[in-house]
Image (cartoon, rainbow, N blue to C red):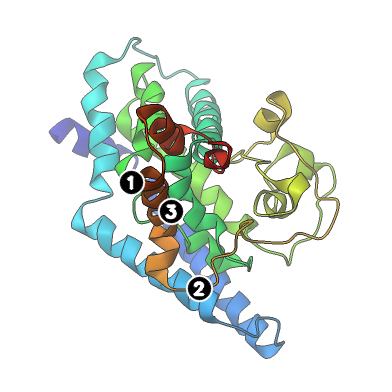
């Protein structure tokens, strides 16, 4: 791991800037909460409380080592890299572009495969949409999401540099969880903006499974999943949870999957329940 430590030290300043961005966003979260309290625009605070609790548990899990799985998984793939990429001027732009592309497909598959949706649905289950929604991430994501970024390593990007690109894609998305920034015009078609991301969190029929991109909307345009914000967004999931219990938020879909696995017989039905699209069990 000495080589990995040296790589981390080489990009220590970059990680410092990423951490600073995280601290600035935390300040924005608190300022938004104060604003909403003073203006009575968030009359019920149970969802906000749940988001903070989920965030605290995720932070604890990372300190206990769950987040290390993400790093270790990529490190183990390094010996199998197909290319030895030279660090020319195109290296970092390509790394960011590839990380964003892989994020798009990870995100899309998390919506299209039920067992993955059982994890990702945590982020979509709030009927509110504010900066604390960015904290509402499943406690199980670190167990498997690193798998989607293995192509970066196999193509020859080093682990730490891949992590930098991935963190930038993820950190960028913090500020877009807000209703306080309106349309940004043509930028909404090019980048993942608050308007584009409000659509993604909508349960309106025309907004379902749209706008998966991390930073760029180009992937959504290319693969037919782009949708502009054209009407008021109804936030949350199509079957509202009706609770702000963090345990229920994290595991309710797994409970429903287990019920369906018991209900339907035959391995084909069970595979469809696990790996079909969310809601496909209704056709069994």
Q: Quadrant of residue 247?
A: bottom left
Q: Residues within 10 Å of mark 2 (few under 14, many from 20)?
A: some
The answer to whether marks 1 and 2 mark residues whose Cβ atoms lie closer than 8 Å is no
Please indicate, yes or no, whether residue 97 appears anywhere in the rendered image.
yes
**In the displayed structure, would residue 249 be above or below residue 41?**
above
According to the image, label 1 marks what residue? 142
Residue 41 x/y as whole percent: 71, 82
Residue 271 x/y as whole percent: 40, 31
Residue at x 67%, y 41% (from the top left corner) = 211
**In the displayed structure, would residue 227 be above or below residue 197?**
above
Residue 256 numbered tag: 3
The Cα atoms of the two marked residues, 2 and 3, are separated by 15 Å
Residue 5 x/y as whole percent: 20, 39
Q: Quadrant of residue 10?
A: top left
Residue at x 51%, y 56% (from the top left corner) = 123
According to the image, label 2 marks what residue? 243
| Residue 95 shown left or right of residue 218 in the figure | left
Residue 125 x/y as whole percent: 55, 60
Q: Residues within 10 Å of mark 1 (few under 14, many from 20)?
A: some
Indicate the secondary structure of the residue bearing disc 1: helix
């Amino acid at each position: 791991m000495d080589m990995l430590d040296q790589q981390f030290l080489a990009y220590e300043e970059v990680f410092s800037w990423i951490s600073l961005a995280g601290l600035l966003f935390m300040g924005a979260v608190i300022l938004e909460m104060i604003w909403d309290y003073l203006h009575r625009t968030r009359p019920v605070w149970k969802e906000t409380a749940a988001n903070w609790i989920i965030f605290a548990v995720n932070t604890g899990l990372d300190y206990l080592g769950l987040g290390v799985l993400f790093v270790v998984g990529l490190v183990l793939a390094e010996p199998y890299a197909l290319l030895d990429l030279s660090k020319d001027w195109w290296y970092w732009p390509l790394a960011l572009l590839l990380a964003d592309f892989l994020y798009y497909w990870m995100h899309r598959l998390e919506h299209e495969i039920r067992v993955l949706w059982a994890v990702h649905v945590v982020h979509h289950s709030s009927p509110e949409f504010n900066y604390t929604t960015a904290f509402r991430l499943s406690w199980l994501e670190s167990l498997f999401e690193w798998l989607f970024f293995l192509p970066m390593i196999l193509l020859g990007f080093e682990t730490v540099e891949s992590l930098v690109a991935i963190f930038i894609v993820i950190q960028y998305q913090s500020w877009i969880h807000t209703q306080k920034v309106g349309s940004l015009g043509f930028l909404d078609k090019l980048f993942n903006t608050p308007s584009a991301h409000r659509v993604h969190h909508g349960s309106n029929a025309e907004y379902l499974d749209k706008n998966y991109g991390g930073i760029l909307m180009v992937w959504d345009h290319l693969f037919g999943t782009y949708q502009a914000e054209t009407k008021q967004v109804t936030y949350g999931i199509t079957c509202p949870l009706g609770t702000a219990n963090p345990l229920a938020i994290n595991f309710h879909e797994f409970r429903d999957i287990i019920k369906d696995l018991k209900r339907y017989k035959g391995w084909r039905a069970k595979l469809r329940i696990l790996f079909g699209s969310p809601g496909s069990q209704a056709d069994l």
